[in-house]
Image (cartoon, rainbow, N blue to C red):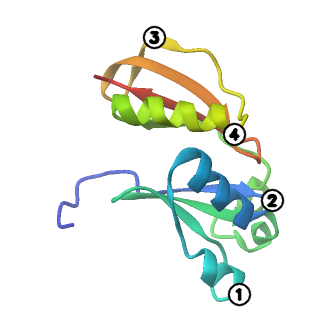
């Protein structure tokens, strides 16, 4: 990719069990796992899952927090999740995500309609949590 315009590269999520989290994101959310084998072999500090060709979610184990000293107070960020992360999907993918979550008994919220986001008014959206309590919103704009 040669376009260097600003865009989201990655989000780091604190998780208790990175392998179980990668499995959740693969099976329930439909995201491609990355570096899980390398993580379990001790060759990488955490695995990730791919949201799209430009964006990944890093699944950081809580013990890694003590090494997050790039800014003062960085280590204290473990256990302090953001309010939620929103992913935008095409309509069919949005419906497929909700179906996968429901099939796996992952609680989902009711639908919201015509809510404002980065691309204007989203037709529908709903919320769910991952196994570590991180809150996600899924939406589509079409």
The span from disc 2 to disc 1 (Cα, nearest Å) is 16 Å
**Which residue is most to the front?**
103
The span from disc 2 to disc 4 (Cα, nearest Å) is 20 Å
> Which quadrant of the figure contains the C terminus?
top left
Question: On the picture, is 73 further left or further right than 49?
Answer: right
Residue density around tag 3, few if under 14, some if 14–19, many if 20 or more, within 10 Å: few
Residue density around tag 4, few if under 14, some if 14–19, many if 20 or more, within 10 Å: few
Q: Which residue sits at x=45%, y=29%?
A: 95
- Tell which tag, 1 or 4, sits nearer the viewer: 4
The span from disc 2 to disc 3 (Cα, nearest Å) is 33 Å
Callout 1 touching callout 4 (CB < 8 Å): no
Numbered label attached to residue 16: 2
Question: Of helix, strand and loop, which one carries label 3?
Answer: strand
The span from disc 1 to disc 4 (Cα, nearest Å) is 30 Å
- Tell which tag, 4 or 3, sits nearer the viewer: 4
Question: Of helix, strand and loop, which one carries label 2?
Answer: loop
Label tally: 4
Q: Which residue sits at x=72%, y=56%?
A: 14
Q: Which residue is mark 3?
A: 113
């Amino acid at each position: 990719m040669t376009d260097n315009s600003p865009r989201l590269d990655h989000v780091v999520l604190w998780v208790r069990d990175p392998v179980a989290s990668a499995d959740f994101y693969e099976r329930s959310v439909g995201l491609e796992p990355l570096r899980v084998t390398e993580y379990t072999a001790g060759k990488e500090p955490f695995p990730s899952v791919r949201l799209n060709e430009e964006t990944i979610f890093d699944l950081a184990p809580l013990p890694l927090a003590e090494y997050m000293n790039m800014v003062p107070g960085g280590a204290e960020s473990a256990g302090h999740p953001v309010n939620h992360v929103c992913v935008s999907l095409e309509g069919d993918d949005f419906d497929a995500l909700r179906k996968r979550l429901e099939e796996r008994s992952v609680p989902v919220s009711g639908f919201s309609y015509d809510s404002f986001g980065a691309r204007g008014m989203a037709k529908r959206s709903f919320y769910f949590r991952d196994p570590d309590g991180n809150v996600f919103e899924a939406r589509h704009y079409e």
